[in-house]
Image: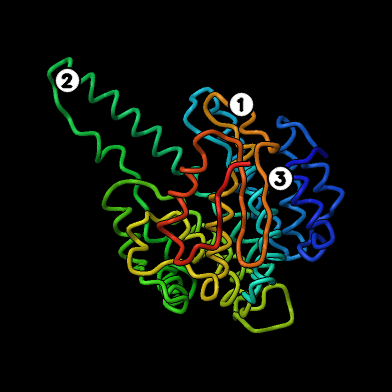
Amino acid sequence: MNNNINNTLFENCKDYYHHYDCNATEIKEFYESSMSEKSNKAIYLIKNILTINRKQETYKYLEQLNNIENAIIPLKFQRDHVIHTLNCFLLGIYINEYFFSQNTISKVNIFQWKLASLFHDIGYQLQIADRLISNFKKNIAEVNIKLDINFNLDKIFSILIDNNLITLNNNINSLDLIQTTLNNWGLKIKVKKEFNKMKQNGYICHGIISSLLLLKTLDELYHKYNPERLNNQTDWNQRFFDEDIVSACSAIFTHNLKEESFKNSKINPNKMNLLFLLKLSDILQEWERPKNNLDNGNPPDLFEIDIKQDKIYFRTKVEGLIDILKNQISPYFDENYIEIVPI
C-alpha cells in the first residue's frame, strides 16, 4: 500500500479491526482494490460486519442503493454513498481509538458505530428519486411557459411520507424516542418540527429518512424475534434496542440537518460522542467518491490524517477543499477539535 490516508488508517487500526468484527486481510484487500471492484467488496464486508449482531439482512438497503447509483451514473449529479459508507466506518475506528482515548472522551459503543456509520445514507434512494422528480417538474414548467399554459405538478408528484413510517409496534412514535435521546445529549432540536418541515416543504432529507427507515426495520425484527420485548440473553435483548439502536438512529436523524438547526446548541463529543463521530467522519471522507467528471473520485494519496494530543489534523492537496471542509465543520462543532491544513 502506498503512503496515503488509507495506508495510515490501516496501519494504525489493523490491530483493532477484530474488535469491530472486521477481518484485517479483507480490509487491506478493499483498500488495495480498483474502484470498479470497491462497491461490491464494500457490500460484502458490510454484510460480514453485521453478521455477528444478526443484522446482516439489513445490508440489502446498501445493495439496492449501489444498484441505483450505478444506474444513474450518466446523469452526473450523484456521487457514491456505498464505498463512502464503509470508508466512514473505517475512518471512525481511527478517530474512536486514538482521538477519543487521548482526550478522555468516552469511546463510542461499537454496535452503535456499526449502525450509525453503515446506515446513515440508506435514505439516499428517496432523495435521488426526489431530485429526479424535481428536474422533471422544472422541465415541464419550462414547456408550460413556452406553450402559455399552466398546471401545477406539485400535488401530482409530491412524495408523501406516511405516518406508518414513524409508528413502531405497541403504538410507539419513533420521533418521541429520538427526541428523548437528543434531549439527553443536550441538543436543542425539535424532532417533530424537523420532520414536519421536511414534509411541508416537499423535500427529502436523507438523514431523517435513513434514521426512520432503519428504526422501523429493526423494530419489526425485534417484534418478530422478541415480541414481548424482554431484556433476555439473546441478540434481540430489548436493552440493545433502547440504548444502542435508538442512539444510532438519533445520530443518523441529526447528521444531515441544516446548520440553522444547530444555532442554539453545537455538537460536543463529551455529551454526544456518537453524533460527533458520525458527523465528522461523514464530512472528512472525501477521497474515492466518484462524482461528476471524477470517475474514481479524488485519490487517497491527496489526503492524510494525524492525531496529536487534543487535535485531529486532516491534510489535503485537493485545490479549494480546505475552505469547503472548514465551512462544513464550523457551524456544527462547539470547539475547535480539528485542523484542516494543506499537505
**Against 318, is 88 above or below?**
below
**Against 105, is 326 above or below?**
above
- Looking at the image, the residue that sits furthest to the bottom is 231
Marks 3 and 2 sit apart, C-alpha to C-alpha, by 51 Å
- Looking at the image, the residue that sits furthest to the left is 148
Look at 25% across and 38% down and name the residue there.
Answer: 154
Q: Nearer the viewer, residue 22 or 229?
A: 22
Image quarter of residue 3: top right
Look at 48% across and 66% down and name the residue there.
Answer: 335
Look at 41% across and 72% down and name the residue there.
Answer: 187
Residue 295's disc is 1
Q: Counting residues from the N terminus, which is met first, the one under dot 1 or under dot 3?
A: 3
Residue 5's disc is 3
Q: Secondary structure at mark 1?
A: loop
The answer to the question of whether label 2 and label 1 lie on touching residues, with beta carbons closer than 8 A, is no
**Against 241, is 21 above or below?**
above
Look at 69% across and 68% down and name the residue there.
Answer: 110
Q: Say what amino acid the circle numbered 1 marks.
A: Asp
Q: Position of residue 301 (x, y in %)?
A: 70, 37
Q: Position of residue 57 (x, y in %)?
A: 68, 54
Is residue 278 visible to the viewer in this orientation of the structure? yes
Is residue 64 visible to the viewer in this orientation of the structure? no
Residue carrying label 2: 145
Marks 2 and 1 sit apart, C-alpha to C-alpha, by 36 Å
Position of the C terminus by quadrant: top right
Answer with left or right where residue 93 lies relative to residue 168. Answer: right
Q: Nearer the viewer, mark 2 or mark 1?
A: 1
Q: Nearer the viewer, residue 122 or 56?
A: 122
